[in-house]
Image: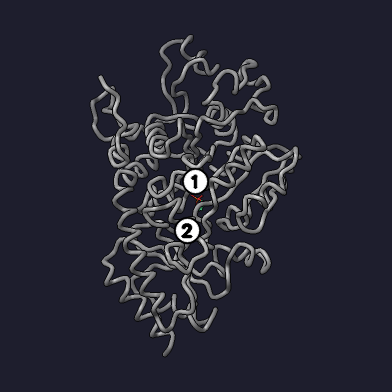
Amino acid sequence: MTERNWGFRTRSLHAGGRPDSATGARAVPIYQSTSFVFEDTEDAADQFALQKFGTIYTRISNPTINAFEERIASLEGGIGSVATASGMSAEFLTAAALAGSGDNFVTSSALYGGTHTLFDVTLGRFGVEARFINGDEPEAYARSIDAKTKFLYTEIIGNPSGSIPDLDGIAEVARAHNLPLVIDGTFSTPYLCRPMEHGADIVIHSATKFIGGHGNSLGGVVSESGKFDWGSGRFPSMTDPVASYNGLNFWENFGEYAFCTKLRSEQLRDIGAAMSPTNAFLLLQGIETLPFRMDAHVANTKLVVDFLDDHEFVSWVNYAGLQSSPYFDLAQKYMPRGPGAVFTFGVKGGREAGARFIESLQLISHLANVGDARTLVIHPASTTHQQLSDENLVSGGVTPDMIRLSIGLEDIEDILWDLDQALHRVRR
Ligand SMILES: *Cc1c(COP(=O)(O)O)cnc(C)c1O
């Protein structure tokens, strides 16, 4: 048989989803079971010792969740993935796998507000220092690296600043220092950008957003490229014997799968932020239409952006697909299908006008989420980013008059009508 490289749409439907071996079910069944019976005592012992792959307990592994993980790894172009309860837990588990007390990592400050707080406050309390840099310049990352640095981190696309990092340039800095580059690709999804094709080693998603696409389930996922050399001496936790697994070590015993194996068999085991099988099932339904939805999200977004850019009551529009954006060229390079469906703009009249605009919308939902099939709106300075100081707001790219839209799949005429009537109501 010849090997075929299946296309993205085919893999969105099939990867990890072979007919169920027990029943022949064609859709991935929901294995809503906490635990799975061993064949015999030897089977049990081998699974516990990581000598054999299997499902012991749903906190660590489960057939429905495994199907979700395999599908994401395939779409991302990685060799494996680990699913988690949420995007936040995906980030925490990744940091916990890579860094410990006394270590640091270098990160862009243009981040999702929750990520900023996790990095700055919670990881700080565990003795892991987040070194925030302004902007995404590769040289700025290089300047902050020292012997205790464990990874580099950024988002593509930055939230809510809309920044597009130069992945190739940052990956080069990471390689020169034997550091893994970790990318949060939530806003772009593997359909619009696959960071591993540009040198990223680990990619994280909040599957809650576009991957699920329907605003009904939380989930997170971490994928690895399998290309990172963990044996440079910088990562003793990858090369030292692990007491809880009879002294095996992740790098020697699992090679290219070292990181995912550690993440699952240590961090997921100990911290316990597992995805639920039912959420894995719902997120799989979303992935089946991911390419179609993303094309439609981007098409609607381009029309909304043009409409707002020309609107007399709008003071500015920030979308990397606009020629006026400082990120236009990077967006063309890294996201040729279009830089996503989330962007920001300012209503003339500042903070107060912004609030009145949001209250005048009839179709568009005011809530704290992005990547839903429905169009969503929020005012970051008073909600998702309210915990940040003014200084952090500005370095995170947030201004007081900023409105963030996540454009959905409704009829474009209806989205434009709602925006236009609300903008006119602000004036009255
Ligand atoms: C929402 C979001 C997260 C957090 O994900 P949850 O699933 O809500 O925990 C992380 N990063 C980005 C870019 C997000 O939009």
Q: Residue at x 55, y 33 (%)?
A: 268
**Which quadrant of the rendered structure holds the C terminus?**
bottom left
Find residue 23 and report its image quarter.
Answer: top left
The one of 275 and 306 positioned closer to us in this rendering = 306
384 sits to left or right of 287: right
Answer yes or no: disc 2 within 8 Å of ligand 1: no
Instruction: Kindly identify the amino acid type of the residue bearing the numbered disc 1.
Output: Ser
Q: Residues within 10 Å of mark 2 (few under 14, many from 20)?
A: some
Mark 1 = which residue?
A: 86
Mark 2 = which residue?
A: 329
Q: Say which of marks 2 and 1 sits in front.
A: 2
Instruction: Kindly identify the amino acid type of the residue bearing the numbered disc 2.
Output: Asp
The one of 386 and 146 positioned closer to us in this rendering = 146
The one of 276 and 201 positioned closer to us in this rendering = 201
Q: Position of residue 4 (x, y in %)?
A: 29, 28
Check disc 1 and report its element: helix, strand or loop: loop
Q: Residue at x 34, y 41 (%)?
A: 284
Answer yes or no: disc 1 within 8 Å of ligand 1: yes
Find residue 270 and report its image quarter.
Answer: top right
Q: Position of residue 319 (x, y in %)?
A: 45, 65
428 in relation to 166, above or below: below
**Which quadrant of the rendered structure holds the N terminus?**
top left
Q: Position of residue 380 (x, y in %)?
A: 54, 67
123 in relation to 35, above or below: below
